[in-house]
Amino acid sequence: MQRQRDYFIDIIKIYACILVVLGHFAQSMLKAQIVSESMFFEWFIQTIYYFHVPLFFICSGYLFQKYSVVSTFSQWKNNFLKKLIALGVPYLVFSTITWGLKSLFSSAVNEQAHGYFESIFLSPISPYWYLYALILIFLIMPTFFNKKIVYISLTIAFALKVITFLPIEISIYAINTVMQNLIWFVLGMCLCVFKPFGYIKPIVQRIIAISLSVVFVVFSVLLCAYDVELTAVSFLMGLIGCASTVIFAVLFSDIDIVKSISLSLSKYTMPVFLMHTIFAAGLRAVLFKVGITNSLIHIVSGLAISFIGPVITTIIMERIKYLDFVLYPNKYLKINFRGKNNGKKT
């Protein structure tokens, strides 16, 4: 039986991916002094960082709960090995490429590279820390098989998040990143378990989504204007931003043309995530090398290559056997993982 696709997850992934690219690109333009600092850039960067990466964790948690079964040691071992390969291979490959480019062209990059071991295992290079964090979360998380596990996991994840609000320095990156992001992953799992949108009429969903969006935008402007950067406030803003995004995605997922577009584009979210900084930084270095400093040229060409470059590269890699192993290693390394979830094989 064919699995029913959750198009709203595709929509969220595409939206979050676009925001990640825009966030990194805006920061690179500021650091390279191609554009000047302004209230708009400060507001934009601060605002999207409230919720764009949490959206990725929510999607990952949702899909983990829907398609995996992890309640025994054997299931955990097989699932973790599967995730370790699926995430670890692209993490290691693209982190190494980025580290190498930063080291080789240190005079042309905005942030200098640390030692290789530190950059890979102790303090991951942006944006690949997300994959690093996911691997650690898969290491410790079971799937929900009863409501008690749901409530226990949610309580633990929330408690860990609250601890990060306290003036306590957690120097070990691996521990800190799990404490910071586990709550979003668990919320994604809860979304899969409870499926709340089936109980709310579409018109009510629209009202809630619009109201939350208005509240989010208004408070994001105020927080930026008054330079408020409290972690607890950022978490609350993230909850509001994620909630409104998820509801809007559910509403749009009923539109056929949106389904078609999201299905076509969602398969490129991972490649764009992995390669956008490499293409953008590479093009920026080339433009500077040939003496092009015009900000409009940098912005237009940089944004275009951030999306087009990874997509074209992925299409080429898929047509050459085994070359796309670095993107989809589990396509070639089949891992026997058996189980049932909602009556469907995983």
Image (cartoon, rainbow, N blue to C red):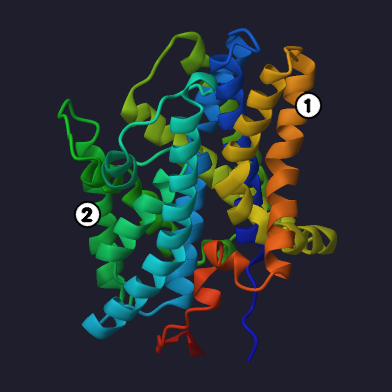
**Tag 2 secondary structure:** helix
In the image, residue 202 lies at what x, y percent?
69, 57
Name the amino acid, label 2.
Ile
Identify the residue under disc 2: 156
Q: Residues within 10 Å of mark 2 (few under 14, many from 20)?
A: some
Return the disc, 1 or 2, that comes first in the chain's sequence. 2
In the image, residue 1 lies at what x, y percent?
63, 92
Q: Residues within 10 Å of mark 1 (few under 14, many from 20)?
A: few
Q: How many marks?
A: 2
Does residue 192 appear in the picture of this structure?
A: no
The span from disc 1 to disc 2 (Cα, nearest Å) is: 45 Å
- Indicate left or right for 216 with 71 as reference: right
In the image, residue 311 lies at what x, y percent?
72, 52
Q: Quadrant of residue 307?
A: top right
Q: Which mark is residue 313?
A: none
Camera-nearest residue between 39 and 127: 127
Q: Which mark is residue 300?
A: 1
**Tag 1 secondary structure:** helix
What residue is rendered at 45% in x and 9% in y?
A: 226
Q: Above or below — where is 272 with respect to 213?
A: below
